[in-house]
Amino acid sequence: MKLLLETLSNKQGLPTPIWFMRQAGRYLPEYLELRKTTPNFLDFCYDPKKACEAALQPLRRFDLDASILFSDILVIPHALGQEVTFEKNIGPKLKPITKIEDLKSLRKNESILNPIFETVSNIKHNLKDHQALIGFSGSPWTLACYMINGQGSRDYANVREIALKDPNFFDYLMNTLIEIICNYLSQQIQAGAEVIQLFDSWAGVLSEKLFLKYSLEPNKKIIAYLKNRHPQIPIIGFPKGVGQNILEFTNQTQADAVGLDSSFSINWINQNLNHTVTQGNLDNISLLVGGEQMEQDIINIKKIKSPHIFNLGHGILPTTPIKNVEKMIEMVKGII
Ligand code: CP3
């Protein structure tokens, strides 16, 4: 039995499954060793053997209920023809596109994504019977943020400005992204992904109006497409930072579960999402600091009444001590 899949089907009374965002990555010394062998991060993501190994590393150390595909959300802008690089201590850098001509002049090459489907299949063949494989994509709005701004930002003010000033360009970009994401996720499923997570990491910077148009609607379309083509595959939506708009998102998108960032109180979750499968919401800084305050947070999260998937509110940070991760998993599994 796969605990994650059972929980996603809204089954009550089961033990809580656990996996965590960025469970493969820089807090693991074995990841840092492996990464050194391919300095260019995208090349690393497109290497089905190394990416598979990176995905499996956390499962060798910890008793987790899922593996997540090792890749990055920015492979989609790359496949659309945009230049994407990752710079040490800065993060991703893209050559920004700011108007419809920029987008139309890109040379799309979806076949660069093919090694990723091979990674999916490699991981799947190495999982234990109780472990599920999660595929993922960035959502259109979050990808548009990086594509237009060219790098991270606190509020993506310029992207929101373009969304309002040039809806023609913006809608064209959204539709382009929806189409490629639907294909990409469908191929991940065909290669063996059993669950899909949509990361809308920057949904929280949007006004109510733009949230409905550029986060909720595109996620809804992608989910409808996947539900039609792969009705048995559960989908986790993660519109980060949207506060109570998570309710509208849940009701309208038909996602099987929603990821919760760390801003939600357990009381609020129990009052407002008691018929929804939820995932999250341990503060990644609480995990990094550890100790009694973390234990209290975990005890609290265990009070969520509806079927719940234990996870963080955002990805694990590179300086997180491994012993804190071990403690978190033991507590969730009820060993201590
Ligand atoms: O274990 C996993 O969770 C699977 C792999 C995964 C990565 N990125 C690997 C990665 C996943 C699911 C992602 C998603 C991702 N990537 C998101 C959405 C989730 C979120 O964090 O909000 C976003 C916004 C990105 C874009 C991205 N990729 C940034 C901003 C950065 C640089 C900042 C950072 O944390 O390093 C990356 C690089 C990246 N993606 C690394 C890893 C392991 C580090 C690269 C390295 O090894 O040097």
Image: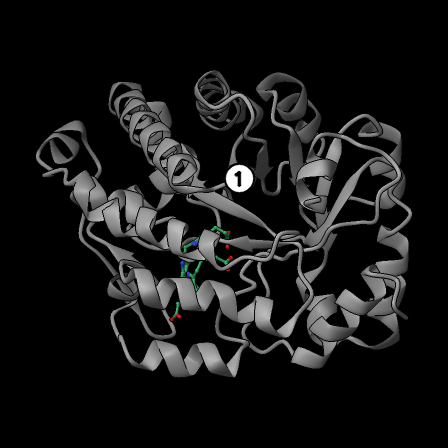
Q: Residue at x 19, y 32 (%)?
A: 99
In percent of width and height, residue 127 lies at 54, 57
Camera-side residue of 36 and 98: 36
Between residue 106 and residue 72, name the one nearer to us: 72
| Quadrant holding the N terminus | top right
The quarter of the rendering in which ligand 1 is drawn is bottom left
Res 27 seen here: yes
Residue 96 in view: no
Examine the rendered structure and indicate whether residue 100 appears above or below residue 32: above
Residue 66 appears left or right of 271: left
Q: Quadrant of residue 232?
A: top right
Would you place residue 322 above or below residue 201 in this image?
below
Foreground of the two, 269 or 227 = 227
23 left or right of 98? right
- From the viewer's perspective, is residue 70 above or below residue 39? above
Q: Quadrant of residue 287?
A: bottom right
Label 1: which residue? Answer: 194
> Which percent across, then down, holds residue 58?
57, 69
Name the side, left or right, on which 90 lies relative to 210: left
- Please name the amino acid that badge 1 sits on: Glu
Q: Residue at x 46, y 54 (%)?
A: 125
Kindly indicate the quadrant of the structure image that contains residue 326. bottom right
